[in-house]
Image: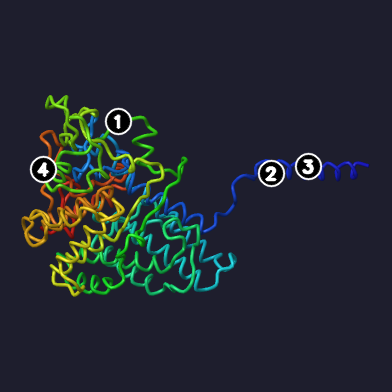
Amino acid sequence: MKKILSFFLVVLLFASCTKLEDLNKNIKDPPKVPGETLFTAAQKRLFDQMVTPNVNLNIWRMFVQQWTETTYTDESNYDIITRPIPGDHWNQLYVAVLKNLDESSKVLTATGNLAGDNKAVLTNKLAIVEVMTVYSYSILVETFGNVPYTQALKTGVLLPKYDDGLTVYKDLITRLNAAIAQMDQSQGSFGMADNMYHGDVAKWYMFANSLKMRMGMLLSDVEPTLAKTTVEAAAPFVILSNGDNASLAYQAAQPNDNPVYENLVASGRNDFVGANTFIDKMNSLNDPRLPYFFTQVDTSTVIGTHKLAYVGGIYGASNDFTQYSHVADQIKLPTFEALIFDAEESEFLLAEGVERGFSVGGTAASHYTTAITRSLEYWKGDTLGLHAYLAQPTVAYASATGTWKQKIGEQKWIGLYTRGFEAWTTWRMLDFPTLVAPPDAKSEIPVRLTYPVVEQTLNAANFGAAATAIGGDAVTTKLFWDKY
């Protein structure tokens, strides 16, 4: 009898433990996330980071003086420490983007055929993940210089070393070349899990080559031979039509709406106006894109007579939101798309290539003109006013003021409106437009971000070595490619 009772007690105990373990199971979240889902998440977070005007994350529009602030002017005066801006940018790219891309690649490699992919489709998916990885690392290098790379994202490596920025950049180009070679444009890829090109591999091929051209051009002053061969190899295959732009279309409802809408409209805040540096330049050129970039304001409170005009707030000063031009309404729509590469940028890069003596076809003037044309097509939906604009001596390539760097640099600065990071990189490379730090600025105009504070404290040895290698962890330390 005792044996029988003991048996039943063991059975009951086992059954009870099984039920308790069942209670601890998470039945809401899947135990494994598909590689496609990880890719989609990384892609959106990347676009969000590049387009958001949230000053905790992205202040490039202020660095290039396209926007300025109203009440709180810290960022317009290059205070990047009060808010942990370098750390937030770093974390968004490493954690939210690169880690998801790394996991996506691993999961796809392990399970790709289970999803019904043939070998070519799986290879395309992995190549596309690699292209986005290269893009993300290129942004980190262009922001900070030396960064964790060979030991980044490695399991068990809590304190990764920093790799030389130039070495990393050259390796990224090698990886990009390999990814391009693996793409089979006759096959599919991510389908609707890809919010940029909906799985169109031919368009990914163009984007990858456009990125390759941009990266090659960035090395022009430090690795001229590599720059030339890289740009020339990519040039025949780059984005030349707005229909092929690398863009992400946002949705009307949170959390998939445009971050510009969230920060400028949904937040109910009035923190930004157009900067006088930018608007004054556009006014002086009679630029037909002004109505698509900014709103007009009634200047009667300023000059005493009723007049509608585009007026920029004084860069770096405290500005009355009601007296200066606001960001145009279409840019603040929740569905307004984000861009990370477009036809206009390709054409400006080709114009630069011609001036640098690269064999990319065409003339600098023709590519410059086409770049402005693509920009007007994008913003206005037509090219009305283009000929009058280009006919002005201040705009025409043959007569515009200054060297080719000034001509291309100033027009590209205007064309890259809403793409502050690339405008900042272009300014650092070409040294145009001429920007002047405001009187109360914390520093000269930053040419890099300092390393995150958490790296200085938790990864001190590697941080210290990196800071020494680049010439000091300061916002004024020029990066390896910024030679002049």
Of residues 458 and 88, which is closer to you in this image?
Answer: 88
- Distance from label 1 to label 3 (Cα)? 63 Å
Please say if the residues under marks 4 and 3 sit with CB atoms less than 8 Å apart.
no
Q: For numbered disc 1, what is the local secondary structure?
A: loop
* Image quadrant where one finds the C terminus: bottom left
Camera-near label (1 vs 4) is 1
Percent coordinates x, y for residue 470 in the rendering: 19, 55
Tell me the kind of residue under disc 2: Glu
Q: For numbered disc 4, what is the local secondary structure?
A: loop
Tell me the kind of residue under disc 3: Leu
Please say if the residues under marks 2 and 1 sit with CB atoms less than 8 Å apart.
no
Vertical order, 106 against 7 (above or below): below
The residue that mark 1 highlights is 270
Vertical order, 68 against 478 (above or below): above
| Residue extending farthest right | 1
Mark 1 vs 3, N-terminal side:
3
The residue that mark 4 highlights is 436
Q: Which mark is residue 13?
A: 3
Q: Residues within 10 Å of mark 2 (few under 14, many from 20)?
A: few
The residue that mark 2 highlights is 21
Tell me the kind of residue under disc 4: Val
Mark 4 vs 3, N-terminal side:
3
In the displayed structure, does residue 252 sit left or right of residue 169? right
Colouring scheme applied when the structure was drawn: rainbow
Query: Quadrant of the rendered structure where residue 155 is?
Result: bottom left
Query: Quadrant of the rendered structure where residue 116 is?
Result: bottom right
Camera-near label (1 vs 3) is 1
